[in-house]
Image (cartoon, helix red, strand yellow):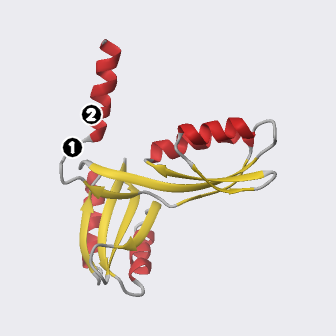
Amino acid sequence: MKHTLSVLVEDEAGVLSRIAGLFARRGFNIESLAVGPAERQGISRITMIVRGDNRTIEQLTKQLYKLISILKVQDITNIPSVERELVLIKIKTLSSNRSSILEIANVFRAKIVDMADKYLILEVTGDPGKMVAIEQLLKQYGIVEIARTGKISLTRTSNVNTEFLRNSFIAHNIES
């Protein structure tokens, strides 16, 4: 199972290296990693996606706390949260397919951030599922390059589980 870990660290040299080393020594792959400044100066938030069962993630969490500069580790996998990714996609375009590509971009609320005669770069922001969906649709046109940020996430203070609401809405509409 994939777990989302939110880790607050002191913003200093070597912290990310020590975390990566810990995971490497334990034989774990970090599938997604995003790092940036947190709400307080001198503190960074690391959001990472790691595969493992609950027991394994609990052990990794304990090991993380033993590292210098780790302030807080939270497994937010099952906690209502807002998740987002950013992806830049460079697509080869022809005059015959440009309008189809722009239509897909419009449906996914993607921004055109660069346009040339034969290429187009889209910026897409949203949940990870949205990134996969637009990438699959655009493959047929020839994706030249792609860059993804990795998932970032914050827990919801409202405790509203949007996944639950989405599933309830879908179930209600199917019954209607």
Residue name at image x 30 percent, y 26 percent: 169
The residue carrying pointer 1 sits among few (fewer than 14), some (14 to 19) or many (20 or more) residues within 10 Å by Cα, namely some
The residue carrying pointer 2 sits among few (fewer than 14), some (14 to 19) or many (20 or more) residues within 10 Å by Cα, namely few
**Sequence-earlier tag: 2 or 1:** 1
Position in image of residue 52 (x %, y %): 36, 53
Residue name at image x 45 percent, y 64 percent: 33
Amino acid on which disc 1 is placed: Val
Does residue 69 show up? Answer: yes
Residue name at image x 25 percent, y 62 percent: 74
Instruction: Determine whether label 2 and label 1 are within 8 Å by CB.
Output: yes
- Above or below: residue 170 compared with residue 126: above
The picture quadrant where one finds residue 36 is bottom left
Q: State the mark number for residue 21.
A: none
Q: Nearer the viewer, residue 50 or 38?
A: 38
Check disc 2 and report the residue beneath it.
165
Q: State the mark number for residue 160.
A: 1
Residue 142 left/right relative to 160: right
Assign a secondary structure to mark 1.
loop
Distance from Cα at disc 2 to Cα at disc 1:
8 Å
Position in image of residue 78 (x %, y %): 25, 47
Residue 50 left/right relative to 53: right
Position in image of residue 24 (x %, y %): 45, 70
Assign a secondary structure to mark 2.
helix
Residue 111 left/right relative to 37: right
Q: Nearer the viewer, residue 76 or 118?
A: 118
- Above or below: residue 115 compared with residue 10: above
Does residue 27 show up? Answer: no
Quarter of the figure that contains the C terminus:
top left
Amino acid on which disc 2 is placed: Leu
